[in-house]
Image (spheres, rainbow, N blue to C red):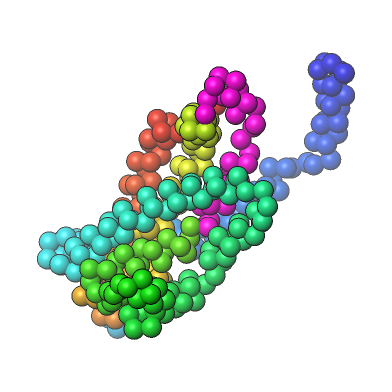
Amino acid sequence: MTVSKLTSVAAPVLQRTRNRLPGEGAWATCFLLPLLAGLMVFLLLPLLVSGYLSFTSYNVLEAPRWIGPQNYRELFGQDPMFHKALLNTLIFAAGLVPANMLLALVTSVLLNQVRRLAAFFRSVYFIPVITSEVVFSVVWLWIWNYDYGLVNYVLKMLGLTGPNWLGDSSWAMLAVIVTRLLKNLGMNVVIILAALQSIPGMYYEAAELDGAGWFKKFLHVTLPELGPVIFLTLMVTIIGAFKVFGSIYVLTGGGPAGATNVLVMYLYQLGFKTFEYGKASAVGMVIFALILALTLVQWLLRKKLVYQEE
């Protein structure tokens, strides 16, 4: 059947479908309004309130008092704990994001080669993602334990003496990064694996005809085709790194000596321990500004970094 015949057959059907669905735009608007209302109430409104409170002195017991940008001046000029939390956040993101992306890519490529037990391996990697962050962190609290933890037990069997992972400021951040890495690695693995399996086989066949080996096929076919997915997972992983809280709260509480005290942990301490809600809101706005700036930079660079088919 030619294209013109297909068009002649399909056109009346499409016309009848449109006739059966009057007011499609109105229905779509009705379904979108609850979501829009939720975003307004639970995202935009708290953001605006937090932005206002960041310019006030507020401790719940008294009404907010407008003090202008004083909270920001204190944070950036006179607050060593904020400086340490900001540095720790950057160190955490710099350690977690590259490791997560590299491991997720390598694991996905290996899983894509597995024919037997593929579903089993996918489930094993994804189980930590659906496990409660608190439960997962409590398990790792035992694994990192200096006296009876699994890591030091294995090191002892090898004739080595493990450090006090969570109690030593030199090792605590590394332990937290590894814990968080294993917690969310499965999500990126599943996403990248799905993208790998959707790459048309003819691309690899054409590359083989040109004499390309495994590495060249990976470099010139796999990576460009995965570009949009890698870009997406990279953005999500960076945002997650800047919002980390649960794992650090359970494992170290921000210690020892503030070695793992990141921005969200510091926000929690200001808001719910010292009740400095104005200053805590200022920290929240700094986190928002950092994530927004990173997202905009990545978005602006996407056309240069991500291959898109015409």
Residue 158 part of the magenta segment:
no
Q: Nearer the viewer, residue 106 or 95?
A: 106
Residue 25 coordinates in the image, percent (x, y)? 68, 42
Residue 239, located in which quarter of the rendered image? Answer: bottom left
Residue segment shown in magenta = 186-213
Question: Depth check: 287 or 185 in front?
Answer: 185
What percent of the width, then of the height, locates residue 77?
A: 12, 61
Residue under the point 15% across and 67% down:
80
Whole-percent x, y for residue 252 in the image: 32, 76
Q: Residue at x 46, y 62 (%)?
A: 182
Residue 87, picture quadrant = bottom left
Q: Main secondary structure of the magenta part?
A: helix
Quarter containing the C terminus:
top right
- Above or below, 55 against 302 in this view is below
**Quadrant position of the N terminus in the picture:** top right
Between 36 and 199, the residue placed more toward the observer is 199
Image-based side of 89 in relation to 78, left or right: right
Q: Return the x and y of residue 146 as percentages of the image width and height.
A: 32, 80
> Can residue 283 be seen in this snapshot?
no
Q: What residue do we see at 36% from left, 71% from top?
A: 158
Residue 22, above or below 98: above
Q: Residue at x 27, y 58 (%)?
A: 91
